Image: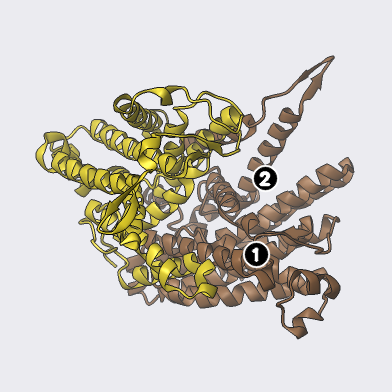
Amino acid sequence: MSVIRRTISTPILLTLILIAIALIAVAAGSRPFNQTVIDIFLRVILVVGLYIFIGNSGVMSFGHIGFTCLGAYAAAWLTMPPMMKQTLLPGLPDWLMNTQLPYWGGAIFAALWAALWAALFGKILMRLSGIAASIATFAMLAMINTIYSNWESVTAATSSVVGIPIIRSIWPYLIAAIIAVIVAWLHAISRAGLALRAARDEPTAAAASGVDIPKQRLIAFILSGAVMGMGGALFAHSIGVVTPDTFYLTLTFTTLSMLVVGGIGSLSGAVLGVVILSSLIQALRWLEAGVTIGTTTIAIPNGLQEIALGIVMILILIRRPAGIMANSELRWPLSHPETATQQNPGEDPGNKPTQQGVSR
Amino acid sequence: MQTLFDALSLGSLYALGALGIALIFGVMRLVNFAHGDVISFSIFALLWPSVDAVAIVFAGELPWFLLIPFVLAMGAGLSVLSEIIVFRRFRRANPATMMIASFALGFVIRYFLLMLFSSRPKSISLLPALSQPVEILGARIPLLQVITIVATIAILFALTAFLKRTRFGLEMRAAAENFTMARMLGVRANRVIMGAFALSGALAAAIGLILAAQTGTVDIQMGASVMLMAFIATVIGGLGSLPGAVLAGFLLGAASVVMQTVLPIDARPFRDAFVYGAVIMVLIFRPQGLIAARGTKERV
């Protein structure tokens, strides 16, 4: 149980950060800002979902947004009123046509549905590693997108599926984000998570010590698929509309960038990457809309927002190539430094020898 | 016959794109996601900034023997510039970081174009003489397709000659095989990398020219779809292996065109899903790619 006690400060601190953001939204009380905060929570769910697989296995995946797509459409199938489904999605089977679940029920089934497909794809894909695995996951994303963009009768092809109940309260999103963080933490300290990180850092030694690498990767893949599916369902409820192209390359790269900028091997990095980049995007949007100082309104030209975002990302990566958190986690500020080094054996290959040299 | 030419000309595009990505990957292990945006940029360099639907042609009025070098130079220039300003600072970073940095750079280029030209596709008539059909063995083939294929083959031969016969080419191949060793033996790292970026940018520009002449429209997204296929071709060809990239590019082009004609009508909209499925199968059976580059094999 000491592993829990040593590491529990990370999920607690991250949860506190998320709650603080929610409280700011409540205090501000404006509806557009509310939506911004909901977007932040959604991205936290997605990026933490990515972290569960990418961070622990070290295999870059471009395919996870595919599971978000699966989850979003599953939520649409399960929670839309039957009347709307009959006109928009006439190809659904009868039992599905007549079900209407509350949003949380839909989200649970969406997560399970995404996990099911993650298991099926993962069974094949997890035999690969390195860049071949990345491309294979990308091919998976493209397959899912092609199928959902063309299967007229159950996904309405490329036109939008409307009529998904919209949830405007921030609390469900906050709770889901916290669940995602806790799932990621529990997986990271579990036997499977430890074995997977061992395989990431020293594949040969891990395999020789009896770690079944494809199996450990598959576990993480399914778990992250489920989190991505849940995120997709809530994404659908946050805007009320889904199209296949919402869940394609743009979202893939946005979420991956947040993970990499935050620090690819760190749960805190995943959360902070989202918070920092989202705040930056929001600040630039405000600037684009125009800020009034005294009597003059200063506005930056359209399109400059994205350019500035790209430049800032490059600058952050130049300064901190391993991301803002660089493989370390947020902890109690008072925790003993020696425990901190014990907690990351092999987390940071660059510093490992010196750290061990000091502590032994 | 028509199918064969379709397959070859689509394959040529993918092969050129794959070469551009493989060249850079070979020397610095960077998967360059900005490549697609270099394609778009080099063709937009021909236009005067405007948001109208019809492009205001600026440098595009040049006669073809000046126009083509101009576009190629724009592509190469942007590519070299991106290496000097951005990628030089990432020499020691891990591949994921470089990949995201290249993506961020592509993002900057794309939105820069968006700011100047808006996101609307523009019609442009580039080298209109090329769209006339010619008769080859009883099939009517657009002249442009023939030129695309011939130009690709010419580029491939020129590139092979360059890599095999010149000192610079030798250095580049040495760097692709074992970068550290090549440096120790006196290869100038930055020069080789800049050369790779210049070549890759020029290849991107060639793709841009062909695409614009083929479709008659330019669009800031136009590079993206070719880039994705090229990227896949690079990997199934064997990352870092140039012949592999070319072979896989042609195979992907052929697979797309053949599936278009072979699949039953109902399944045709799902063509790309089958192509990507085939990609996964290839990767499962040959994770190192069709032609594995030396030095990239995993040892576990």
Which chain is rendered yellow in the image?
Answer: B
Q: Is residue B133 visible?
A: yes
Residue A49 lies left or right of residue A13; in this view the side is: left
Residue named by callout 1: A157
Write down which chain is painted brown. A
Quadrant location, the N terminus of chain B: bottom left
Residues packed near mark 2 inside 10 Å, few (<14), some (14 to 19) or many (20 plus): many
Labels 2, 1: one chain: yes
Q: Position of residue B98 (x, y in %)?
A: 42, 43
Pick the front one: B20 or A60? B20
User: Taking B169 as reference, is A339 above or below it?
Assistant: below
CA neighbours of label 1 inside 10 A, class few (<14), some (14 to 19), many (20+): some
Q: Which residue is mark 2?
A: A275
Residue found at x 37% / y 43%: B132
Look at the picture and state if A44 lies above or below A210: above
Looking at the image, which residue is at 49% across and 26% down?
B47
In front: B89, or B2?
Answer: B2
What amino acid type should be assigned to the residue bearing mark 1?
Answer: Ala
| Res B29 visible | no
